[in-house]
Amino acid sequence: MDNILLKYMEKRFESKIIDPKKEMFCEGPVVTISRECGCTAINIANSLAAKLSAKTGKRWNVLTKEILERSAKELNLDPAKIEYVFNSKEKSTWDEILSALSSKYYQSDRKIKKTIAEVVRSFACKGNCIIIGRGGVVLTNDIERSFHIKLQAPLEWRASQLQKIYNLSMEEMLKYAEEIDKKREILRNYFNKEALPNTVFDVIYNSKNLDEENIVNSCVNLMQQKGVLGKQIVMG
């Protein structure tokens, strides 16, 4: 019974799933940052955006919550209604059914994830942006002028960094870091059914051994060497 109702709902509420990579030609440039839990990305992203803006003469934007907000707007939903997707959760069959019957604004999991993919892709196509997480590396790795970064570090070190934020025990932080890593992997795998190999990244940094300034300077140099910045460079 559940399956019959769910199939009916999908036919009624869901348009054909479209691969955003096939629908949108993207030139970039775009940067994505993937990170293990406990490796902070926002400071690196902001510093990198500032350096790239100065170097190219064009403003670079850092995208995190903007992807959630734009996706919610496209779906005519409150951002809180779709945030569960980024936590790698899915509605049960009966949750889907009750939501569909009780709200004219119902959107299925697949529709929400499809919209998120399209929003990420649209930002990337506009170029000059740095996308933190959100499946960005999977959705933009075919773009020629793209650069993909991964931040990682030993689990114990990451847990110790999390302790500074949450003031919880090492055991709790170890468990938390492992859970978040799994959730992020699930989200990436939704957009790419095969496990994501490390070879998809242009560079992987050990956050324990390298400070943020070194990472940012290295990224700028590597982007220039790869040709990601193209002929946009106007300043030294």
Image (cartoon, rainbow, N blue to C red):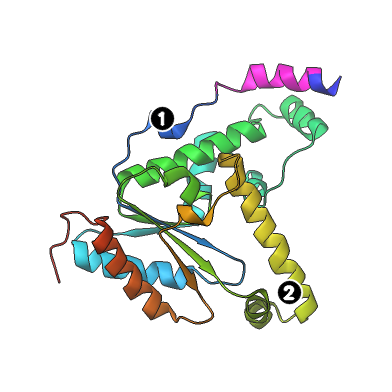
- Residue extending farthest to the left is 234
Closer to the camera in the image, 20 or 64? 20
How far separated are the C-alphas under marks 2 and 1? Answer: 40 Å
Mark linked to residue 173: 2
Q: Which residue is mark 1?
A: 22
Tell whether position 88 is magenta.
no
Q: Position of residue 134 (x, y in %)?
A: 53, 51
Tell whether position 5 is magenta.
yes
Residue 79 appears anywhere in the view: no
Q: Position of residue 88 (x, y in %)?
A: 68, 49
Q: Main secondary structure of the magenta part?
A: helix
* Image: magenta residue range: 4-16
Give the amino acid at mark 1.
Lys
Q: Is residue 127 above or below residue 54?
A: above
- Residue 190 appears left or right of 233: right
Please tell me which of labels 2 and 1 falls first in the chain. 1
SS assignment at label 1: helix
Q: Position of residue 96 (x, y in %)?
A: 75, 31
Residue 8 appears anywhere in the view: yes
Give the amino acid at mark 2.
Met
What's the residue at 75%, 23% (across, down)? 6
Q: Position of residue 116 (x, y in %)?
A: 52, 41
- Residue 226 appears left or right of 157: left
What's the residue at 15%, 54% (across, down)? 231
Q: Quadrant of the C terminus?
A: bottom left
Closer to the camera in the image, 6 or 39? 39
SS assignment at label 2: helix
Mark linked to residue 14: none
